[in-house]
Amino acid sequence: MVAFTGSKNTGVWIYEHASKVQLTKGGVKRVVSEMGGKNAIVVFPDADPDEVVRAVLTSSFGHANQKCSACSRVFIHSDIYDRIKQRLIDGARSLPVGVAEDRGTFINPVISESAKDEILRYAEKARSEGRVLLDNTQGPYPSPWCIGPLIVELDPSQLAAASIASEEIFGPILTITPFDDDEQVISMVNSTSYALTAGIFSRSPSTVKNMAAAIKAGNIYVNRDITGARPGIEPFGGFRLSGTGPKAGGGDYLSAFVTRKDKGERRHRRLNSGDGHQTPPNVDMPRPWDVVPPAVRLACLREAVSRLAEENGYRLREAIGVREAAAETQIERLISTLNKVLDTVSEIDRPQPTLEVPGQKNFTSWETPRGIGIVAANDATEPAMFAGMVFGALLAGNGVLVASSPGCQPLCDLLIDNLYSAGVPKEVLASVSFEAGGARGTSSRRTAASGGSIGLLTDLAERPFNFALVDLDESDTRSIYSVMGITLESQGQNWFKALISLDEGPRLGEAGFLRLLALPKTMAIRTLRHGADLELV
């Protein structure tokens, strides 16, 4: 495997090339990466101005902004914009720039001459793309690699065209922008390819809750600076093109560095390879099932399990396609597995506390789904495992396209009919079947495709899916991974496509399985104010 911390471009290159490696001992070459951000702080009218100014200056100019978690964008509500803006300008102007050995230094030199040159190139862009409010980039300073703060004002209408508002600079250049309402600022904060850290300044619990749910960032800080994450307290890591996860210092981190010892005990069948590249089927892309809370999704899925167990005994035996005595065992295992998956909902439906520290409330939330995923299995996949994969992906709030081999198709049809009847929206669940002999009858959310199964599946994987949950032969898994490892940022793909193989990590009903299907956000809420330990008021 590869564990990498560095630039976005290098991380994208590593992910793509690792996906094409065929390991001599089998399996796929995993990548754990952390690659930086374009991190924002959002300031609301009820924020404490003193807290805001201190935290923004520390987060933006401490260590000359040479931290992946550092702030480079500040969005200030228009009601207090002019007042906070002037205080930031005055505060940044007073920051001491000097050598690192001097205890009075606040902004130390950048790491190298090439880094300085790159930052100064961005400074030239900043001067042309926005309105300069403070420009202390040039000294005289005691080191040739010192760069002072540059603050640039950008109107909301300028953000889309401004490179300084979207590209990581890794230097003391800050943009500030006014906003009028929540919808506007959420759109602006989430407008980059990154999702690492963010800050919220407000004394309203409802504002904090709504913004934290909407902002795309792996670590969200409330009423404090946004750098200096501590393993175990603020498990660290983002998503989109800020990294692959899992979070460093989180409970799932070590699992990324191990693989299953029992994966060789299961035998798969290769999917039909067909005649090379196939024409992909015309599939309606599902949408995430994130408009309802986990409790509502859980109720729908439990109703679907009940329908399978009580109303469809004969159809379920037919769908499983084995002799009656064996079918009863398979049905019991299927229902038991589905209930085990649903019983693990606590992994995602409530905050998971991290290590406690005085004056701060810390937890990780798993309520954000990965997005849209392919669930793919072959004829050797046990019915219980196949059904559990579909139910688990839905429970986490994802949109799901079920890609089934011919042997799985009867069960796939039955599962989807029951899920629709139980209240799962048709917009979040669809299926495609691979049949070498030609197309079969379809409904509006079911599509049949002719040709080689693996070729069509890899063609599907090229589409804008966020993940694939698979139980396939190792060679077929590698084929999909080699396609999903390619990140087409120029075409709007601002995320890594995650491969989740049941041969590699937690399986259905095991601790951590459901969390593989969601994106974690770690919250750190400062409660210590003026010497008192207070909740948000």
Image: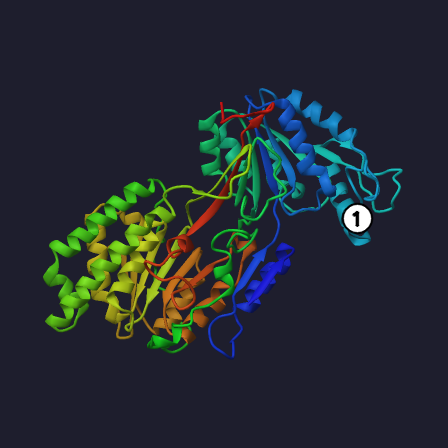
Q: Foreground: 501 or 446?
A: 501
The image quarter containing residue 210 is top left
Q: Position of residue 28 (x, y in %)?
A: 48, 70
Q: Position of residue 430 (x, y in %)?
A: 30, 55
- The N terminus, quarter of image: bottom right
Q: Amino acid at mark 1?
A: Lys
Horizontal side of 294 relative to 188 (left or right) equals: left
Seen at 66% across and 28% down, the residue is 53
Does residue 3 lie above or below 124 as drawn? below
Q: Position of residue 402 (x, y in %)?
A: 31, 60
Horizontal side of 315 relative to 263 (left or right) equals: left
Color style of the picture: rainbow
Label 1 crowd bin: few (<14), some (14–19), many (20+), radius 10 Å: some
Is residue 442 in sight in this rendering?
no
Seen at 26% across and 75% down, the residue is 437
Question: Disc 1 on helix, strand or loop?
Answer: helix
Does residue 285 lie above or below 382 as drawn? above
Is residue 120 in sight in this rendering?
yes
Does residue 197 lie above or below 535 as drawn? below
**Number of numbered discs on residues:** 1
The residue to which callout 1 is attached is 116
Q: Foreground: 295 or 131?
A: 295
Q: Position of residue 482 (x, y in %)?
A: 49, 69
